[in-house]
Amino acid sequence: MSELKAVLEYYRDLGVKSLYRVAPVAITSAADLSPVVAPVLPPAASLEIPVMPKPPQLFTALPSLEPENDSFDLIRADIGDCRRCRLCEGRNKIVFGSGNPQAKLVFVGEAPGQEEDLQGLPFVGRAGQLLTQMINNTASKEGIPITRDDVFIVNVAKCRPPENRAPQPDEMEICGQFLSRQLAVLKPKAICALGGTSAKALLGLKEGVTKMRGNWYKWRDFPVMVTYHPSFLLRAYNVEAKREAWEDLKKVLHFVYD
Ligand code: URA
């Protein structure tokens, strides 16, 4: 009983008012954070192996709320007309994610922007066009017969934050349960985390993207490659970052499709 009280106080302190299906195994739970995250592929000699922060004791005692026979239909039904956090107030459409449900590769972005919010689809604005080009052109140049339609694209937060701000920790925690369920259903060969918010949600790491990009980590048993967010790459001065992002993408594509 005191454990339950501690959990409720924890969520109250986060500003969470409704606990409907807030899974204790959301992205930052014990199950997700352990075992210690280490690069999946042999790291370069100089690469530091990041060590995960210890998960809050709170989560370790709690059972998973992920349904055993989970599916996209169930997840969509559970999301419903979601009102679990403040992001519902300004959204037009919930952006579930899109692509091939059998995809071997999943890209995880941050949150919908204006265009995504209007269409209900991820990465359809300017950043999305760049992401599409990156996937299609890199695959084609590398002789890998896939296009954007063959991967799955999803965001950490399913609703557009006001002014395109980053999702806040409680919003990520609440929505993270759906992301973790989507990834568990997809069972991809690899995940590509686009930008710091995605990397933080999946890996719980505080390092900046510049330090993490190009390396392999793990979310549960799934290899995760961190790279720059396409919005960041749209800024004209990021020529070097663009080159690095292309390198990261090549690595991911060859790992998944070779
Ligand atoms: N940026 C994101 O992170 N996701 C989108 O869907 C669009 C822009």
Image (cartoon, rainbow, N blue to C red):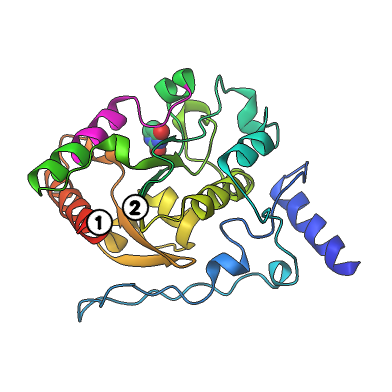
Residue 25 belongs to the span the image colors magenta? no
Quarter occupied by residue 215: bottom left
Q: Residue at x 40, y 21 (%)?
A: 115
Examine the rendering and report whether any part of residue 207 can be seen: yes
Q: Residue at x 64, y 60 (%)?
A: 25
Q: Are marks 2 and 1 in contact (CB under 8 Å)?
A: yes
Q: Which residue is mark 2?
A: 192
On screen, residue 46 above or below 211 = below
Residue 124 belongs to the span the image colors magenta? yes
On screen, residue 203 above or below 57 = above
Residues rendered magenta in the picture? 120-134
Q: Residues within 10 Å of mark 1 (few under 14, many from 20)?
A: many
Which element type, helix, strand or loop, lies under badge 1? helix
The answer to whether residue 244 is left or right of residue 225 is left
Of mark 2 and mark 1, the one earlier in the sequence is: 2
The answer to whether residue 67 is left or right of residue 244 is right
Q: Residues within 10 Å of mark 2 (few under 14, many from 20)?
A: many
The x, y position of residue 119, in whole percent, is 45, 19
Mark 1: which amino acid? Val
On residue 252, which mark appears? 1
Q: Residue at x 23, y 55 (%)?
A: 257
Q: Quadrant of ligand 1?
A: top left
The answer to whether residue 222 is left or right of residue 65 is left
The x, y position of residue 154, in whole percent, is 44, 40
Instruction: Give the Cα separation between the discs numbered 2 and 1.
Output: 7 Å
On screen, residue 165 above or below 47 = above
The answer to whether residue 215 is left or right of residue 12 is left
Mark 2: which amino acid? Cys
Q: Quadrant of the C terminus?
A: bottom left
Q: Is mark 2 within 8 Å of ligand 1?
A: no
